[in-house]
Image (cartoon, rainbow, N blue to C red):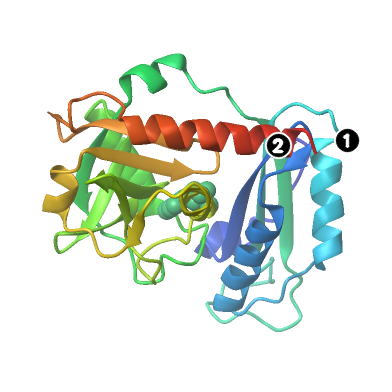
């Protein structure tokens, strides 16, 4: 990877003019590959950049990166930028070829304390733009939020707009009240998370009630359980919010149930 080169004029570097995906693979098999590639298509269409690779080409590049089954658990990072024109101009000439970069790295196993103790989160106003459905490489707000969380000894920052929850800096947010999962509906205010969608599918399959509706911050604070979802972190139980315990301060029973369903689903993927 240290030998890969990119031009200093690359629009990803100069403008953050690009989009990306992170796709987990278990044993050499991707989890929800087509959904990730659909979201890549949607992000590219939103920034009006033609996908430089056909679906089959993506599949073969990605499979080559993770290796043939049985392979170690890895996540693939891929990004497409608008390429490297000769000069810096917000308007990009039509003949510039996009830059494609992809690499695989090991997925770290979850620390066992997470299942017994959960993780801490803080809340902050959502300072991002109004196209959060695009998986853009312009991540400065997420970088700032991650730093704020770290400084508060928390794992993640949960954001809200005028008191209504949007998502985490690098994850989606779900909560449980009265044995029902609640999560903000997809919109331009949050990324349509693939793990969020899988969690809701598993809930549906196993008769767990869920609602996709706006979640006021106060409702989140009073939740029995709070979960974060993301492709590399799976579904995590949040047990402290802004220093106060969530529910009884321990990972809740519905999270334990969902985690078992999620792990079983992963094992099915791993076995091809
Ligand atoms: N929301 C944001 C802002 C993210 O950056 C991510 C993942 O990186 C997610 C949600 C979770 O998305 P997924 O489950 O597709 O990984």
The reply to whether the residue tagged 1 has its Cβ within 8 angstroms of ligand 1 is no
Viewer-closest of 52 and 72: 72
Q: For the C terminus, which image quadrant?
A: top right
**Nearer to us: label 1 or label 2:** 2
Which residue position holds label 1? 68
User: As displayed, is residue 216 above or below residue 50?
Assistant: above
Decide if residue 47 is in sight here.
no
In the rendering, which numbered label is found on residue 238? none
Disc 1 secondary structure class: loop
- Residue at 33% across / 56% down in the picture? 183
Q: Nearer the viewer, residue 112 or 46?
A: 112
Q: Is residue 96 above or below residue 61?
A: below
What residue lies at 38% left-to-right and 34% top-to-bottom?
255
Q: Could you classify mark 2 by the number of other residues whose Cα lies within 10 Å: few (under 14), some (14-19), or many (20 or more)? A: few
Residue 136 locus on image (x, y percent): 51, 61
Say which residue label 2 marks: 268
Q: Regarding mark 2 in the picture, which secondary structure is present there?
A: helix
Classify mark 2 as within 8 Å of ligand 1 or not, answering yes or no. no
- What is the quadrant of the N terminus in the image? top right
Q: Quadrant of residue 82?
A: bottom right
Above or below, 9 against 234 in this view is below
**Left or right: where does residue 219 sit relative to residue 72?**
left
The percent coordinates of residue 204 (x first, y second) are 48, 54
Whether residue 212 is situated above or below residue 168 in the rendered picture: below
Q: How far apart are the two marked residues, 1 and 2, measured between alpha carbons?
A: 17 Å
């Amino acid at each position: 990877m240290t030998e890969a080169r990119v031009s200093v004029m690359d629009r990803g570097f100069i403008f953050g003019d690009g989009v990306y995906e992170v796709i987990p693979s278990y044993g050499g098999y991707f989890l929800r590959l087509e959904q990730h590639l659909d979201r890549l298509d949607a992000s590219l269409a939103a920034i009006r950049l033609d996908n430089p690779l056909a679906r089959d080409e993506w599949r073969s590049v990605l499979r080559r990166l993770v290796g043939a089954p049985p392979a170690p658990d890895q996540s693939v990072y891929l990004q497409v930028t608008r390429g490297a024109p000769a000069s810096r101009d917000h308007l990009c000439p039509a003949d510039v070829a996009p830059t494609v970069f992809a690499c695989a790295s090991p997925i770290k196993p979850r620390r066992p304390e997470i299942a017994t103790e959960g993780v801490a989160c803080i809340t902050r106003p959502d300072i991002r733009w109004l196209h959060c459905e695009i998986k853009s490489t312009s991540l400065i707000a997420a970088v700032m939020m991650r730093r704020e969380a770290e400084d508060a000894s928390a794992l993640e920052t949960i954001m809200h707009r005028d008191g209504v929850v949007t998502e985490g800096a690098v994850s989606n947010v779900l909560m449980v009240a009265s044995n029902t999962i609640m999560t903000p509906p997809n919109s331009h205010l949050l990324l349509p998370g693939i793990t969020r969608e899988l969690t809701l599918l598993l809930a549906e399959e196993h008769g767990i009630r869920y609602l996709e509706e706006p979640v006021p911050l106060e409702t989140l604070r009073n939740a029995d359980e709070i979960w974060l979802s993301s492709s590399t972190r799976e579904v995590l139980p949040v047990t402290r919010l802004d220093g106060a315990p969530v529910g009884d301060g321990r990972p809740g029973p519905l999270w334990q149930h969902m985690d078992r369903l999620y792990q079983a689903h992963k094992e099915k993927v791993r076995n091809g």
